[in-house]
Image (cartoon, rainbow, N blue to C red):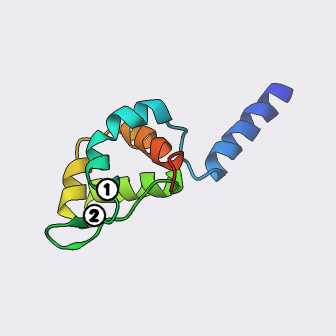
């Protein structure tokens, strides 16, 4: 009986934690090279369309994963981000998000 309650408690914790599993920041650092080409340059502005590129260091991992999923699904319309996320696995997204969440602002 205690085992069943423990399993139920773990399942409930996973369900109510937003559904985002932990990523590996070290693996994310290796995978984020392309990301840093825009998001790692102070005061960088995208060429077309021209806008200020947000710095994502210190951002919540859950937010970053949700954003990458939305770009991949076409729910967010930035062409470069859609292309960057197109071939990412769920684990890639989790790792990259963990790296940026632990990076300085």
Kind of element beneath mark 2:
loop
Can you tell which quarter of the image residue 9 is in?
top right
Q: Position of residue 85 (x, y in %)?
A: 27, 49
Question: Can you name the residue that lies furthest to the bottom here?
Answer: 50
Query: What's the distance in space between the residues labelled 2 and 1, CA to CA?
Result: 5 Å
Task: Work out whether residue 33 or residue 72 is closer to the camera in this orientation and state it.
Answer: 33
The answer to whether residue 45 of the structure is visible from this angle is yes
Question: Can you name the residue that lies furthest to the front here?
Answer: 42
Q: Which residue is mark 1?
A: 41
Left or right, 2 with reference to 21: right
Mark 2 burial class by Cα count in 10 Å: few <14, some 14-19, many 20+: some
Kind of element beneath mark 1:
loop
Task: Work out whether residue 105 or residue 61 is closer to the camera in this orientation and state it.
Answer: 105
Residue visible at 23% across and 49% down? 84
Can you tell which quarter of the image residue 64 is in?
bottom left
Q: Position of residue 6 (x, y in %)?
A: 78, 32
Residue visible at 49% across and 42% down? 98
84 versus 79 height, above or below: above
The answer to whether residue 1 of the structure is visible from this angle is no
Residue visible at 15% across and 67% down? 47
Q: Which mark is residue 44?
A: 2
Q: Are marks 2 and 1 in contact (CB under 8 Å)?
A: yes
Residue visible at 70% across and 45% down? 12
Question: Can you name the residue that lies furthest to the left here?
Answer: 48
């Amino acid at each position: 009986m205690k085992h069943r309650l423990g399993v139920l408690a773990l399942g409930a914790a996973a369900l109510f934690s937003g559904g985002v599993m932990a990523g590996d920041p070290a693996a994310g650092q290796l995978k984020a090279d392309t990301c840093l080409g825009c998001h790692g340059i102070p005061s960088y502005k995208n060429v077309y369309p021209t806008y200020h590129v947000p710095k994502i260091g210190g951002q919540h991992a859950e937010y970053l994963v949700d954003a990458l999923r939305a770009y991949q699904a076409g729910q967010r319309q930035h062409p470069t981000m859609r292309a960057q996320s197109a071939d990412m696995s769920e684990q890639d997204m989790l790792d990259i998000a963990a790296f940026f969440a632990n990076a300085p602002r």
